[in-house]
Amino acid sequence: MTATGAAPGVAPEAAPGVAPAVHFGQGHREPYALALQDGYGKLTLRPDSDNPPGNLVEFDVHGWCAEASIMERSLLGSLRGPVLDVGCGPGRLLAAAGQLGLAAMGIDTSAEAVRRACGRGVHALEQSIFAAVPHSGHWQSVILLDGNIGIGGGVTSLLRRCRQVIAPSGTLLVEVDAEDIDTAYSAVLEDWHGNRSEPFSWARTGAAGLMIRTHATGWIVTEIRHVQGRVFCWLRPQTGQARSIP
């Protein structure tokens, strides 16, 4: 799927200069908030129409609400602080970062997620990555795990935004799809009772889709790891490239 003016193999994304929608659904009665309140069950991410077909992703709410795994702690151990967790959810990675001695802050558009995260004793703000981020330009590490490369439905826009907030010598850790996929679409979250969120913009991409975008967004991929069925990419900023800090 290629938008007019897009590079071949790159999914169409949000128009430049427009802050993409980033919500899983607003309000404490939305499926995402309800799932976090219960702390278990499944959430399914699906297109809000039959076009495009497929693109079903199941999220393990219990895993989000549990402690970080040994593997995830190992990933965090490869980073330097301070760490910005984009789409931090209920804060398991923030808590693990703190236990490893890393200063960390999370941002999430879900009030319930931020409430849960703060309940762990970590620092999290209810806001979008596309809003003004505190300490922009000083984050030594930025993380996009658990599918959060899809936030806003524009992988290119999100990579450019992360380039604006990270330190010149920083590291961006991105989890990409294990499938060879590159797509952007309007999605909904559905819980195990059939309740659906309001539609929001989302994207999915694999390592190839990420690689296509790196040069244009100011990044260099330094490492790719396949671990326990998940795929992680380490990126660093290109040197000598101008950037604006909001």
Image (cartoon, rainbow, N blue to C red):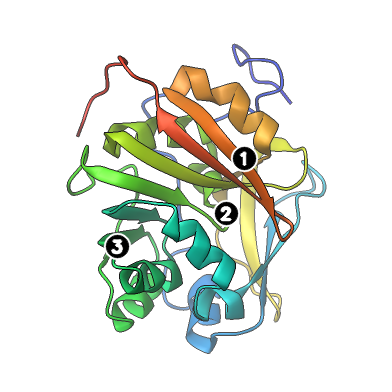
Q: How many marks?
A: 3
Query: Is the residue 192 above or below the residue 9 in the image?
Result: below
Seen from the viewer's position, the closer of residues 135 and 101 is 101
Secondary structure beneath dot 3 equals: loop
Amino acid residing under circle 1: Ile
Residue bearing mark 2: 199
Lateral position of residue 200 relative to residue 238, left or right? right
Query: Is the residue 117 above or below the residue 54 in the image?
Result: below
Seen from the viewer's position, the closer of residues 86 and 32 is 86
Secondary structure beneath dot 1 equals: strand
Amino acid residing under circle 3: Leu
Please tell me how crowded label 2 is: few (under 14), some (14-19), or many (20+) other residues with Cα within 10 Å.
some
Q: Position of residue 99 (x, y in %)?
A: 34, 74
Q: Going from the N terminus, do you reach mark 1 or mark 3 first?
A: 3
Lateral position of residue 159 relative to residue 203, left or right? left
Q: Is residue 59 visible?
A: yes
Residue drawn at 62 percent across, 63 percent down: 189
The image's mark for residue 102 is 3
Amino acid residing under circle 2: Pro
The image's mark for residue 224 is 1
Q: Going from the N terminus, do you reach mark 1 or mark 2 first?
A: 2
Lateral position of residue 165 relative to residue 33, left or right? left
Lateral position of residue 187 relative to residue 131, left or right? right
Task: Quarter of the image for the C terminus: give it.
Answer: top left
Q: Where is residue 25 in the image (x, y as percent from the top left)?
A: 49, 63
Q: Where is residue 66 in the image (x, y as percent from the top left)?
A: 52, 81
**Separation (CA) of disc 3 from disc 2:** 35 Å
